[in-house]
Image: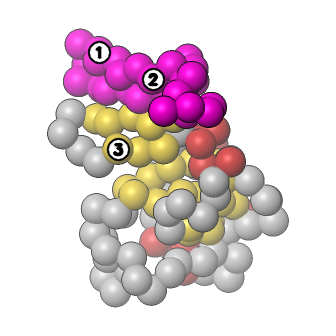
Amino acid sequence: MSGPAAAADLAASFSKDHVQMFAVNGEVLFFQLRDGPWIPTLRTLHRFPTMMPLVRVDRGAIRFVLKGANIMTPGLTSPGGALPQHLEKDQIVAIIAEGKEHICAIGRTLQSADEM
């Protein structure tokens, strides 16, 4: 094989906390908690923002989300929020805030869009 892919330094890393990381040229691109799905890092999502479903929280939720709070349904269904109708329970989603252009968090749905 030739070209940039042949020269890439690929690495998988495992931690005692059951977190696996996948890195290319020293940059972690994805991580996995225990046996869960592989999840992109925020940096990966900033490069490829359409790689997973996107939900939007309203302005009132921004400061709480940035402090690590769980997102409640009203933050997604109120004016300013956005919730795609095709979301399933336990789906990994990218989270963006109303009025902002970059993804600010990654989450997992605890309910389907129909249940919300």
Q: CA distance from mark 1 to mark 3?
A: 15 Å
Taking 114 as reference, is 98 above or below it? above
Secondary structure state at the residue bearing disc 3: strand
Classify residue 31 by image quadrant.
top left
Q: Relative to the observer, which residue lies in front, 54 or 69?
A: 54
Quick one: quadrant of the C terminus?
A: bottom left
Density class for disc 1 (Cα within 10 Å; few <14, some 14-19, many ≥20) is few
Closer to the chain start, of discs 2 and 3, is 2
User: Which image quadrant for residue 108?
Assistant: bottom left
Residue 10 is labelled as: 2
Q: Amino acid at mark 3?
A: Trp
Q: Which residue is mark 1?
A: 15
* SS assignment at label 1: loop
Q: Is residue 76 magenta?
A: no
Viewer-nearest residue: 82 or 45: 45
Going 73% across and 66% down the picture, which residue do you hit?
Answer: 98
Tell me the residue at 56%/68% (across/down): 55
Residue 28 visible (yes or no):
no
- Do residues under tags 2 and 3 come within 8 Å of each other at their CB atoms? no
* Marks 1 and 2, how far apart at CA: 17 Å
The spot of residue 48 in percent (x, y) is 63, 54
**Does the CB distance between marks 1 and 3 fall below 8 Å?**
no
Q: Residue at x 60, y 77 (%)?
A: 82
Is residue 19 on the magenta stretch? yes
Task: Give the residue pinned by disc 3.
Answer: 38
Q: Where in the figure is residue 62, as x and y percent of width and height?
A: 68, 54
